[in-house]
Image (tube, grey):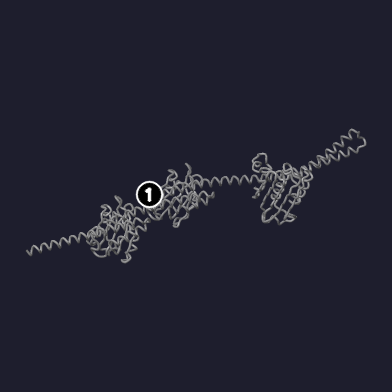
Amino acid sequence: MPDQEKTKKQLIEELQDLRHRAAQTRYEADQQRQTFTEVMLTLTSKLSLPDVLDEILLQAHRLVPYYTASIMLLEKDTLRIARWKGYDIFGSEEMVSRLEQPLAEFPMDNEVIQSGEPVVIFDTQQDARWVVLKETTWIRSTLMLPLRLRDHIAGILRLDGSKPGEFTIKDAHRLKPLASAAAIALENARLFGAEQLARKQAENLRRANLALTKTLDSDTILETMLDHLARLVPYDHASIILLGCSDSLNVTRYKGVRVLEKKVKPALRIDKNPLIREIIKLQKTILIPDTHTDLRCKKNRITDQWGSWLGGVLSVGERVIGVYTMKKAQQMFFNEDHQRLAEVLAAQAATAIVNAQLYEQVRAGQARLQILSGQLVEVQEAERRFIARELHDEIGQALTGLKLLLEMASSSPNKSSESDDSLRKAQQLAENVMEQVHSLSLDLRPPMLDDLGLLPALLWYCQTYTERTGIQVSLKHRMVKNQRFPTEIETAAYRIIQEALTNVARHAEVSEVTTRITALNRTLNVHIIDQGVGFNVTETLKATHRRGLTGMHERAKLLQGQLKIESKRGIGTQITAELPLPALSMERNV
C-alpha cells in the first residue's frame, strides 16, 4: 500500500513537471514568436543596406550572445565581407575588413551555400572542413547560417568563438528565423538600393544631357562628358579620342587620378590599336573585366597598369566620330551596368560633339564671309574714292576747258544771233554738268573725310543736305571735335548717317531731323532721330529691296558693333549705331 501511494505521488509530481515544462515550452515559443515578430518588424523597417546589416548583427546578439560576428554577401562564386563586429579584440579586424572567400577554396562556406542549412563547428581544430588562416587561429568554434529567401541565398551570418563548444545546434535553430527575416530585409534593401541607384543614375544622365546641350564649345563638351562619366562609372583613367584625317586618332581629352601611362601622343594609328580598331569596325562597346587574361590587352600593353578596361564608340547614326576608353586598376570592376550607362552618355555626347562641330563650321564660314564683306566694303570705298577723284580732276577739268571755249566763242565779233543763243544754252548746260559732277564727286567720297576727318565731313554734308532737301539737320556732337578715328570707323559712321538722312528725305515727311555723335568709353555712338511717319521695322527689313537698312547693319557688324532701328507709325524713327573704338584711336588731333 505505501508503495502504491508512493507511485501515485510520483505520477502526480511527474505530471506537474510535464505541465510545467509544457508551460515553459509554450512560454519560450511565445517569446520566440514575439521576438521573431519584433525582429521582423525591426528589420523590415530598415531600407538602406548599412542599416539592415547593423540591425542583423544587433538582433543576432539579442538571440544568441556572442563576442564576434560577421555578415558575408555572395557575389557570383565569392563571399565578400559586408559587416563585422568584435574582431578588433583579437587583432583580426584589418584582415576581416578585406576578407574575400571563393567558395571553391572554403569547403565549409560552400557547404552552407549549397545545402541552405546552418553549420555548427564545435571545435575548429577537430574539423577537416575548417580552413586555417594566420589571423584567425584564435577561432575555436563557429556557427554559420545561410541568409536564404526561397531558392536565393544572399550570404552568410557567422558567429565565431574563442573557445570550443561556444555555439550549439539549439543556437542555430534559435537564429534560423532571424536568418529568414534577414534575407527578406536584405532583398528589400537591395531593391530599394537599386531603385535609388536607378533614380540617381537617371538624374545624373539628365544633368549630363542638360550640360552637354547647354554649350556649343567642343572642349567644354569633352570635359563635361569626362566629368559626368566619372559620376556614373568611377574610373581611374579615361580618354576621349576623336577621329582625325585618314586613319589617325586625335587624343582630345584624358583624365584620371591614376595617370600611370607615358605621355599620350597627339595622334594614334588605328591599325596599330587592335582594341580601338575593333570598336570602330563593329561599332560596339568592348568590356574586359580582367585585362591580365585577355590577349587583346597584352597586345596593347595595358595589363601591367590596369585590371579592367571598357571602351566604346562615339557615333551619330552610322557615322563614327570617335572612341572613349576607361581603365581601372581593380580587376573585375567594370560590369554590364557600367557599360550601359557609358553607352547612354556617349550617345548624348556624340550628338553634342557633332552639333559643336557644325557650329564651328558655320561660325568659321561666317567669319570668312565677314572678312570678305569687309574687303568688299574697302574695295567699294576705294572705287568711290577713285571715281570721285577722276570726276573732280579729269572730267571736271575737261568741263572747265569746255566752258572757257564756249565763253571765248560767245565773245567773238563774228557770231550771229542764232549762234549766240546756242552758245548761251551750251554754256549754261556746261555749268549745270559741272555742278552735277562736283556734287556726285562729293557724294561718292568727300575728300574732306580723308583730309579733315569725320566731323568736318558731316558738317559739310548736313549743310548741303539741307540746301538740297530743305530739311534742317541739328548736328550735335561730343568728344568728336578735332579728333581722328580709324578710317573704317569714320567711313562707317559717315555712311550710316548719309543713308539714314537719305531715308528721312524719301520717307519721313518731316522738316527737321536730329543727329548726335559722341565718343565715350571707347565707343563711337551715332543717333539719327526724326518725328516722321515711322514704319514697321520687321516688315521693312524683310523687304528684299531695302538694301540701305541692311547695309547699315552690315557696316556696324563688320566693325564688331551693333545697329538698332526703332520706329512706330505716326511717332517717328530712331537709329542708333555703336561702333567700338580701339584704345589708341583718339590720340591723333587734327
Residue 244 in percent (x, y) is at 50, 46
Q: Which residue is mark 1?
A: 295
Q: Is 249 left or right of 590, judged from the image as shown?
A: left
The single residue placed furthest to the right in the displayed view is: 413
Label 1 sits on what residue type?
A: Leu
Residue 555 in percent (x, y) is at 67, 47
Residue 144 seen by the camera? no
The single residue placed furthest to the left in the displayed view is: 1
Who's the residue at 60% across and 45% down the image? 366
Q: Nearer the viewer, residue 278 or 199?
A: 199
Q: Is 103 left or right of 239, judged from the image as shown?
A: left
**Neighbour tally class for label 1: few under 14, some 14-19, many 20 plus, Cα within 10 Å:** few
Q: Quadrant of residue 543?
A: top right
Residue 465 in percent (x, y) is at 77, 45
Residue 283 in percent (x, y) is at 44, 44
Rendered view: 146 above or below 360:
below
Q: How many marks?
A: 1
The quadrant of the picture occupied by the N terminus is bottom left
Residue 69 seen by the camera? yes
Q: Secondary structure at mark 1?
A: helix
Q: Quadrant of residue 21?
A: bottom left
The quadrant of the picture occupied by the C terminus is bottom right
Q: Is 352 left or right of 483, judged from the image as shown?
A: left
